[in-house]
Image: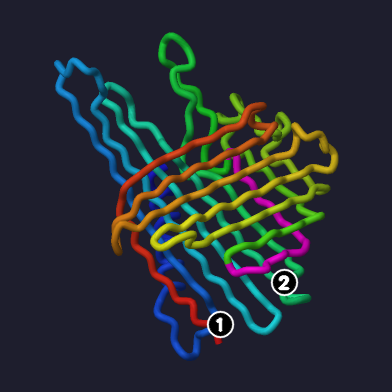
Amino acid sequence: MIKRLLAVLTLALCTTAALAQTTTEADTLWRRSFAAGINLNQSAFSDNWKAGGVSSVAFNTHLDARADYKLAKISWDNAVQLQYGLIKNKGEEQRKSIDRIYLDTKYGYAISSDWNTFVSANFLSQFTKGYEYDVDADGTDRLISNFLAPGFLTFALGAEYKPKPHFSLRLSPFAPRFTFLADEAVGVNERYGVPEGKKVRTEWLAAMIQAAYDRDIMQNLNLRANYMSYINYKELSGKKIDHLLNATLTAKVNRYINVSLTGNFVYDYDQDTEVQYNQSLALGILYTVQGFSVR
């Protein structure tokens, strides 16, 4: 588990760090950015603290990187988003607070100043096992997720509207998706739409809508949001349309210190009939590198 986490993080760090090197005269077709941060939180209470409270320590780390290529009418955009966090309360086992892997790549061809045709692929999963805690009076934990359980690989073909560098909208009438359930132990408790006895669910006839916004809305305050809607043509009921939204508001205190508010919202009928969400507010260290020269 830990080896897998370290391997993926190391690969992502090496790859994105290489992409984020200072732009040279011979390499000016790329627009690149790299940001990595770690947030820590700790609290302690004596055993006789009358106001109540639980000693705890928590951390979460995140990595965001982009490498976008453009030559004449051709573009190739790539993004990596990794998040992982742990929390340890006194008297309880260590638990995850956040766990997310998101990779996206898109090849486009401009047909006007604001519109592109494109093909794309994205991958969504997590690093380590996830549990539903204390499901009975004995405090039993129930395994409900793991790496590639579920995992989502989605391909898309369509048109992209990008009137401004900070906003884009992708419309994909053809977007086949593969849902993986690689851990049989997870499959005993949760199927994520994968049929019994199978490890992969394929949805060929589907559409996808994606919107992205990333902009400094004022000095030292950045808002980044990504929305995705997935529509299986066989299940056009509003309750069966998947929605995913993640947003981060980041305020820079100085070059290395930042305050961030992050939220993730998921509605997937195959996972749960209610909206899932997580939210975090953190003060931490942020390291960024950017190189945006374009020939």
Asked whether, in this view, residue 33 is left or right of residue 157, the answer is: left
Which quadrant of the figure has residue 96?
Answer: top left
Examine the image and state in which quarter residue 286 appears: bottom left
Q: Amino acid at mark 1?
A: Leu
At mark 2, the secondary structure is loop
Nearest to N terminus: mark 2 or mark 1? 1
Q: In the structure shown, which secondary structural element does the residue marked by tag 1 occupy?
A: loop
Q: What residue did someone put label 1 on? A: 29
The front one of 243 and 135 is 243
The answer to whether the residue labelled 2 contacts the one labelled 1, judged by CB atoms less than 8 Å apart, is: no
Say which residue appears at 34% left-offset and 34% top-offset: 87
The relative height of residue 26 versus residue 224 in the rendered view (above or below) is below
Looking at numbered disc 2 in the image, what kind of residue is underneath it? Asp
Q: CA distance from mark 2 to mark 1?
A: 19 Å
Q: Position of residue 14 (x, y in %)?
A: 41, 66
Image quarter of residue 261: top left
- Left or right, residue 269 beside residue 253: right
Q: Residue at x 49, y 55 (%)?
A: 223
| On screen, residue 279 above or below 185 | below
Q: Nearer the viewer, mark 2 or mark 1?
A: 2
Q: Which residues are magenta?
A: 149-165
Q: Which residue: 35% across, 50% down?
A: 259
Q: Say which mark, if any, is on residue 114.
A: 2
Return the x and y of residue 182 as percentages of the image width and height. Answer: 60, 40
Specify whether residue 70 is painted magenta.
no
